[in-house]
Amino acid sequence: QYGHLAAYPASNILIISDRASNVNRMMRIIRRIDQVANQDPEIVPLQNASASEIVRVVNSFYQGAAATEGVAVKVVADERSNSVLIGGDQAQRLRIRALVAHLDTPLEAGGDTRVRYLHYANAEKIAPKLKEQITGIAQAAPGATGGGAQASPLAQAEKNAMVWADPTNNALVITAPPKIMRAVMDIVDKLDIRRPQVLVEAIIAEVDVDKSAELGINWAAFSKGDNIPAGAFVSPVGGTSIVDLAGAIQNPANASTALLQGTTIGIGRIAGTGVNFAAMVRAIRGDTNTNVVATPSAVTMDNQEAELKVAQEVPFVTGQFTNTTAVTGGSVNPFQTIQRQEVGTILKVTPTISAEGTSVMLKISIESSSIGQKPAGAVDLVTNKRTITTTVLIEDGGVVVLGGLIEDNSVKGEQRVPYLGNIPLIGLLFKTRNATSTKNNLILFIRPKILRDPAQAAFETDLKYNYMMDQQKDLNRREALPLLPGVSRGKLEPPPQPGTATPPGNASAPGASPSGVPVTPGVAAPDAGAAPEGAAPAPQSSPPPAPPPQGKP
């Protein structure tokens, strides 16, 4: 009689007005009625459509209906299994399931065709791998094999799937069913990423010291009227004997091969009759100091080999052909076979950035070669070669010694006439002494730098460019050297400090120098802050702080 019950559909609530005991009894009844019939979520696997796309469409469609009817329905996508999870009222779930089944239908039997333009990856290299991936997906599908059983839809669609590359546009053309298309596109998204670059700087420091000394005396007695020795003491000095020197005196054409470097003094008597004699004293001392510092550097992509060569191709004689003919009665050399070898500095490096992005593994090969002095008895040129091939792990920006060679050789020799060479003081006339001391010091350093973004690459480029400009200015300070096209000055501005900004009025217009003077292409613009000629150079600005290490994508 005093009770009142009303429904408010807008908020899906009941309004009860009665005695306290009756209200409590009605609340217990309503709680037992207001329950979901099935609390377990329903899983709907999809065969053709994308789970995330289906959930987006369903939530957009039922968003207004759920608010109006007051029925809570939740739809979630599972990307891993490409399934849709539905929870809520039983009636609403039936409606949503019917809608999902309608949307999960193949578009066409032949599949869909898409053109994917790549930004960083190579389309020609990826296309064969994607074909193998499509074949693997179809073979792994249920029903792909099994004797006379009917093949699965994926196995049948794999025959119509096609992937080919367009090298002109660096694009992939893919024709495949929706499920295979989604898998292929996910793979392409993970492969077509920007990879960091690595700047590898090496220092090859080599110091060679070569000292030699030689002192010797030749004695010889000749027969009458010729240069055939009747007796001689001590072996040839420096590769040439007193006999060769005597022959050069009689025939000046042989002087170029008989005379030696250093101080050579000969005395004797060479006449047409009588007994001839001669003596040759030779003394020579040689000092050779070599200091070579090479700093090769190269920039390459992650996991890509870079090769830098600063070398000459030197020809080496490997063979020759001599033919003697009866017509001319002489010998000729129609040709010589040569082989060219590279002599200089050769750097090969393959960097691999770690997953954390803080270290670099380098597979590196460095070769430093030069043409050395031709020793006695050598038939051709002699090259000095230093090579190291190794794999190292270096922190970003760290310096590591790859290897080194420290060699110290000392050789002393003496040749003398038995008994006569042992006589004090007088024995010096019957002996030859030589000594050679060689020291070689070779050390190789390496430093990698990870260039994660264009700003770091531009900064390193400007450092190298400014260094070359400074070197050219030191060689010729009076000549105005042109800058690179588009560069208004040869010095970098100091990097801005954190929390500061450049005023809008100080921005330089394109083609103008900082001082406001227009810049002509090929002519260096005057720098208002440049020091006068002869003044000490300003200190170089330090590079900006490196960003915190990030993991590889």
Image (cartoon, rainbow, N blue to C red):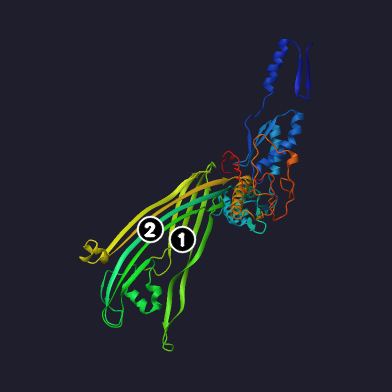
Q: What secondary structure is found at the residue carrying circle 1?
A: strand
x and y percent of residue 167 in the render? 64, 59
Quadrant placement of the N terminus: top right
Are there few (<14), some (14-19), or many (20+) residues within 10 Å of tag 1? some
Taking 81 as reference, is 53 left or right?
right
Q: Which residue is drawn at 63% across and 56% down?
A: 163
Point out the residue furthest to the left here: 419
Q: Is residue 418 visible?
A: no
Q: How far apart are marks 1 and 2 (CA)?
A: 19 Å
Relative to 406, residue 1 above or below: above
Are there few (<14), some (14-19), or many (20+) residues within 10 Å of tag 2? some
**Given the image, on which type of amino acid does mark 2 rest?**
Lys
Quadrant placement of the C terminus: top right
x and y percent of residue 103 in the render? 70, 43
Q: Does label 1 or label 2 sit earlier along the sequence?
A: 2
x and y percent of residue 201 in the render? 53, 50
Relative to 238, residue 98 above or below: above
Point out the residue furthest to the bottom here: 327
Front residue of 482/326: it is 482
**Given the image, on which type of amino acid does mark 1 rest?**
Ser
Relative to 174, residue 242 above or below: below
- Which circle, 1 or 2, is nearer the viewer? 2
x and y percent of residue 453 in the render? 62, 45
Taking 8 as reference, is 536 left or right?
left
Q: What secondary structure is found at the residue carrying circle 2?
A: strand
Q: Which residue is drawn at 50% across and 58% down?
A: 346
Q: Is residue 284 visible?
A: yes
Q: Label 2 near label 1: C-beta < 8 Å?
A: no
Front residue of 304/289: it is 289
Front residue of 361/183: it is 361
Q: Which mark is residue 370?
A: 1
Name the residue beneath numbered marker 2: 211
